[in-house]
Image: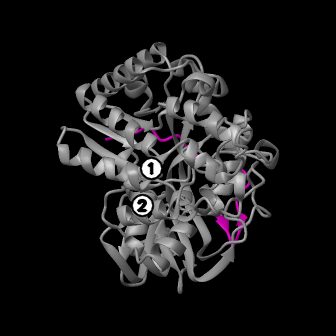
Amino acid sequence: MSYDLVIENGLVVCPDGVREGCNIGVQDGKIAEIAAGPLTGREKVDARGLAVFPGVVDPHTHVGFANRPKEEFYRESRDAALGGVTTMMVYMLQRGSYLALHGDNQAMGDENSMVDYLFHYSIADQKQLADIPALVKEHGVASYKYFMTCRGAESVRLKMEAVDDGLLYSYFRCLGQAGAIPCVHCENMEIYFTLAPEFQAKGRDDLAVWNEARPDWAEAESIFRAVFLAAKAGCPKIYIVHLSSRAGLEMIRRLRAMDLGIEILVETCPHYLILDTDCPAGVAAKVNPPIRARSDCDALWEGLAAGEIQTVGSDHCVRTKQNKGDSIWKGLPGFIGTRHVLQLMLEYGHFRHGLSLSKVAELVSLAPAKIFGAYPRKGAIQVGSDADFVLVDLERASVLTAANTLSIGDLCVYEGMSARGVPVRTVLRGTTIAENGALTQEKGRGRYLPARF
């Protein structure tokens, strides 16, 4: 048989381990064969000297925070493709009925996204909760975010109604009954509202004070409250987004040991693994939860190696130098990063911390796809899955910079850092969409992915 595409001679990173000199046959956008011997194809890509990973499935990206959602879908997905991302899981934060908004959101994604995508919708009121059963059943939106931080001045900034623990409990009960996954941002904002004025009165205005004003124990306390309430509401699982601290990880260990009858899934991000409060980016690295101490980075690496943390996502959020300014108290939180997830995890996870190539692929592709209902379509190089690949030169290093970004965001918190594992080709459903740092497709090729479990 002659395949549409054959990728040959690569070091193929499969769920069950790495296979040397493998050949992959692609037909109709799907992986049709993985063979040790030669295959015939109308198009051939020689991957000799390269590692072939499944396309990156980034579980945590944002669209809309720059108030230009169409342009964000267009530009952020193209920047993502250059880094080997083939699926973006997009958090949308909107007022009103998501059931009414979903059609427009999907049309926007289908028209503008270069890569495949699914939605996590952010919930802030009872009316939005009422839409969830229909969204799950009719549109396959099976994951929803809750900002425990959406209180007081923070709810004003987010332009959302303030939340309370009664809504949080209702959220867990609703999602448990609908078979959906709660994704929770765990921080205690009342602690921040108490501490921030004290530090401001002392004249503190540096990156480290953001960590002190939103302390690790305020994350740990909120994790306990979220997991406990979810368990009491009968929710079978909870997904803790962007874990940032040793204290938070230790709380998760205690909760798992309590055997509350709930599965606790955990995500962290490259910036919590790599950056600390001495980060050269300074106040530009403001993010929620904060960048923390080096000891927190070390703890999170230990958690990854031990299997206590399931996924690594970017928390990609468009911010510009103008958004950031020069004050930790006034600048907006967040920054871009989806393009660099795989390369950072190869440099720091594989080369520096000894994670296997298969483990890296699990963290950035397989586990997110499984958790959020995109597997087996996405996340793995195996027969029947979508032909999504990123070909990586493990021996080559490049300097991370905002100078060549396609993102609206014009700053990189990893600016000037060198990392091995350069993505040289990204393939989405059998079509090359990026090669050697440039896009090879003009029109977006993204498709909406309804969750399937």
Give 57 or 167, whichever is nearer the viewer: 167
Tags 2 and 1 in contact by the CB under 8 Å rule? yes
Residue under the point 80% across and 49% down: 321
* Residue neighbourhood size for the residue with mark 1, other residues' Cα within 10 Å, grouped as few (<14), some (14–19), many (≥20): many
Asked if the stretch drawn in magenta spans residue 55, the answer is no
Residue 369 visible, this angle: no
Q: Which mark is residue 243?
A: 1
Mark before the other along the chain sequence, 2 or 1: 1
* Residue neighbourhood size for the residue with mark 2, other residues' Cα within 10 Å, grouped as few (<14), some (14–19), many (≥20): many
Residue under the point 51% across and 22% down: 124
Give the main secondary structure, helix, strand or loop, of the magenta stretch. Answer: loop
Counting labels gives: 2
Give 7 or 142, whichever is nearer the viewer: 142
Q: Residue furthest right?
A: 322
Q: Quadrant of residue 390?
A: bottom right
Location of residue 86 in the rendering, given as x and y in whole percent from the top left corner: 55, 56
Q: Amino acid at mark 1?
A: Leu
Location of residue 317 in the rendering, given as x and y in whole percent from the top left corner: 64, 45
Q: Is residue 246 left or right of residue 341?
A: left
Residue under the point 35% across and 50% down: 370
Location of residue 80 in the rendering, given as x and y in whole percent from the top left corner: 63, 56
Tell me the SS state at disc 2.
helix
Residue assigned mark 2: 300
Tell me the SS state at disc 1.
loop
Q: Which residues are magenta?
A: 434-453
